[in-house]
Amino acid sequence: EKDKLLDTMAKEHPEIKDKLNKVEEKTKEIKEETDKNIKELESTRDTKTDGLNGEIQTLKTELAQAEQKEKTDKVLKENMTGDQAAAIEFAKQFEGMSEDEMRKVFKEKGYQFDSGAWCADFVRMALGEGVGLDNLPDWYKNSSNPAYCPTLYSEASAAGAVIDISQAKPGDMVLFDWDGDNNSDHVGILVDSGDGYNIKTIEGNTSGSSSSCVAYKDRDMSTIRAIVSMG
């Protein structure tokens, strides 16, 4: 009835129809503007929410890293003495440093540095500076190629230096086999012999703050090729 009445009025009074059309157009414009404003507000809200979520995640990560560092420092204090502590203390001062930064350190200290494959070089420098090369086992001190992990494994095995995880202590050498092919691919220094599932090491030429740097690592026991006593 209302629509019929409006149609009748529109026919009899064209000026009313024009006014109605203008009202409808204005109403449409207001609705479109309102919808636009709502979308902009929602977008702003979502952007701010994403930003806050990102900040929260960053804080959580930093907290987890701080807690892990505190735990690691506690383990070091409880389990190491003398030269062992000195070797890892020396190593951990470089945590987060990249390959380019470490190249300069090796040069300053007078140690060999193999670009792209310096994990064993890092172990040798840490042990050499912490324990002293003259105080290290003869097989290692006189190694034919201390920068090559397979050579370290064969020479340590021949010297009877490969030990069980139950005998391991912080400062010992850990050789890793990533592929399960009984070849040594990587080496680090043991920090904590772990819980039977994982161990903690400090390593050079590993992932962390960059693709090749010094970092603490939690390693699965299944990746261990050998643990070598350096005592």
Image (cartoon, rainbow, N blue to C red):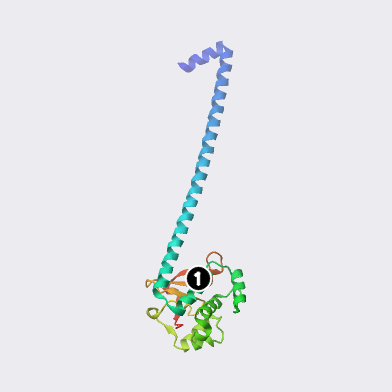
Q: Position of residue 94 (x, y in %)?
A: 54, 70
User: Which residue is rendered at x = 53% and y = 31% of the image?
Assistant: 34
Q: Is residue 114 visible?
A: no
Nearest the viewer among 43 and 171 is 171
In the rendered view, would you say 55 is above or below 216? above
Q: Amino acid at mark 1?
A: Lys
Q: Is residue 13 visible?
A: yes
The answer to which quarter of the image holds residue 209 is: bottom right
> What is the tally of numbered marks visible in this picture?
1
Q: Position of residue 152 (x, y in %)?
A: 51, 83
Extreme-top residue of the structure: 12
Nearest the viewer among 179 and 129 is 129
Circle 1: is it few (<14), some (14-19), or many (20+) Cα within 10 Å?
A: some
Location of the C terminus (image quadrant): bottom left
Task: Determine which residue is flagged by label 1.
Answer: 92
In the rendered view, would you say 31 is above or below 120? above
Location of the N terminus (image quadrant): top left
Extreme-front residue of the structure: 82
Nearest the viewer among 46 and 72 is 72
User: Which residue is rendered at x = 39% and y = 73% of the image?
Assistant: 78
User: Which residue is rendered at x = 37% and y = 79% of the image?
Assistant: 166
User: Which residue is rendered at x = 61% and y = 69% of the image?
Assistant: 100
Q: Position of residue 82 (x, y in %)?
A: 44, 79
Q: Position of residue 20 (x, y in %)?
A: 55, 18
Per the image, label 1 sits on a secondary structure element best described as: helix
